[in-house]
Amino acid sequence: MSLLERVECPADVRSLEGGQLRELAQELRDFLVRTVGASGGHLGPNLGVVELTLAIHRVFESPRVPIVFDTGHQSYVHKILTGRRKGFERLRTTGGLSGYPSRAESVHDLVENSHASTALAYADGMSKAFAAVGECEREVVAVIGDGALTGGLAWEALNNLGASNARVVVVLNDNGRSYSPTVGGLPRHLDRLIDRDRYADLHRLLGGDPPRSSSLTGAGLDSWGGLFGALGLRYVGPVDGHDVAAVEAALRAARGGPGPVVVHCRTKKGHGYLPAEQDCADHMHTVGVIDTGSGAPLKEPAVTWTDVFSATLVELGELRPDLAAVTAAMAGPTGLQRFAERFPGRCHDVGIAEQHAITSAAGMAMAGLHPVVALYATFANRAFDQVLLDVGLHRLPVTLVLDRAGVTGPDGASHHGMWDLALLGLVPGLRLAAPRDAATLAEELAEAVEVKGPTALRFPKAELGDAIAASRRTGDVDVLREGSVDPVLLVSVGAMANTVLEAAE
């Protein structure tokens, strides 16, 4: 029996010793490649948190100590260690395991979290609740990273945590990436925490005492801690996130003192699987069914709605020098990568920060540009206030392009783009289009960027269907099929056109 087959709960992990932990880490990676490669899912992020997750479960006793995973796609190893290994071959299938934490699956999953930058706020609230019932020593572990610390909500939570006595351990999984390399000033700050000599010189230049470190296996314990320390959090690190013993030592040091603490773990996305390590685009962040030996997809990807949007935007960019593109850390998945490569100075990655993306786009529009903000429909929900007041109130020419609108299949409930139509319909003056095929997508995008006010396009996560020609147009309405049955009228919206035509037959 393998070590992995003997692990049924976190207590089994705590009973292992050094050599066994290294063996278990390798078995976990092999298991992830085999099962996720067969079903599809988030591979790269989970390969990067194997040792980190093992260390967390050795130090903290879940579920009494809640473990909250930000960007919940990092939770596969956690699921395996908490008794769900036997169901893993049905990951992201009907009746199978969710691709994110799920309260219905296990008492070890407290937060069904797949939207980034939320874990620290959850942890802040949990710690306040524990204190209210007299459990002031009860801890909360918040695992954040994979780009999620670029989100404003995370910093709102850090601001509150820093002024508290909350027993919150913030495990920062610093892999330098979300899908692509993390943008903005945060990576530079984290790099300075790692380069101690350079950071000490900088601090002396600013007139303060240099950071002080004490001996700790695999990590330094700073009394200053850079920006985290300035906010009021203790800082432990940096530590090699692929060394179970080092991470465990850092976590034990972190839990020993009062107040919140950041444990800074350096990891590599896709670690331990050569095809993922060599994938420069996103280290196999998400995969379909793959050949596990080479990492190559077993099915050639079909042309999608996203592909058509991507090509059309480049064509429009050639004609319109005032067009700019904005992405919230997802240039590749939302189809902006080609625009970024063709017009590198006109595509702006703001990190996982949808609210900032919209208001920054509003500023661009005020100053004479026409920004196209490409988001997953589910993530646009986070920026409704900015769409309503920062764009809509000013009637600004900003175009939202909402990918993955509608039901997104195996991505699960939190990723379904089910609410954008209802929400955007409340914005005065906003014109919204739902194309039915490639031709109408191109036509409506071209029309949208000509409008002197807010516009939006939405399309599904799906392969493109056949072209659907109209028999005639009445005003703004295309008539797709006319028959002899009266008075039956079927109205389709967007990608439902094929389904409605089948119903007409």
Image (spheres, rainbow, N blue to C red):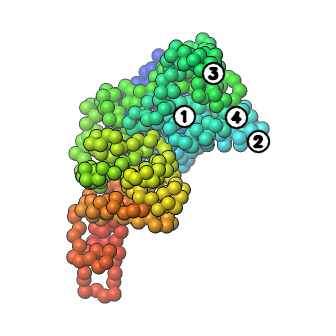
Left of 317 or right of it: where is 95? right
Look at mark 2 in the image and give the residue it sits on: 133
User: Which tag, 1 or 3, sits closer to the chain's start?
Assistant: 1
Residue 41 visible in the shown view: no
Q: Amino acid at mark 2?
A: Val
Element type where label 3 sits in the image: loop
User: Which tag, 3 or 2, sits closer to the chain's start?
Assistant: 2
Element type where label 4 sits in the image: loop
Disc 3 crowd, CA 10 A, few/some/many (<14, 14-19, 20+):
some
User: Which tag, 2 or 4, sits closer to the chain's start?
Assistant: 2
Residue 224 visible in the shown view: yes
Query: Pointer 2 and pointer 1: residues touching (CB < 8 Å)?
Result: no
Q: Nearer the viewer, residue 305 or 368?
A: 368
Point 35% across, 33% down: residue: 283
Give the CA distance from mark 1 to mark 3: 22 Å
Which of labels 2 and 1 is toward the front? 1
Residue 496: quarter of image? bottom left
Look at mark 4 in the image and give the residue it sits on: 163
The tag on residue 224 is: 3
Give the CA distance from mark 4 to mark 1: 20 Å
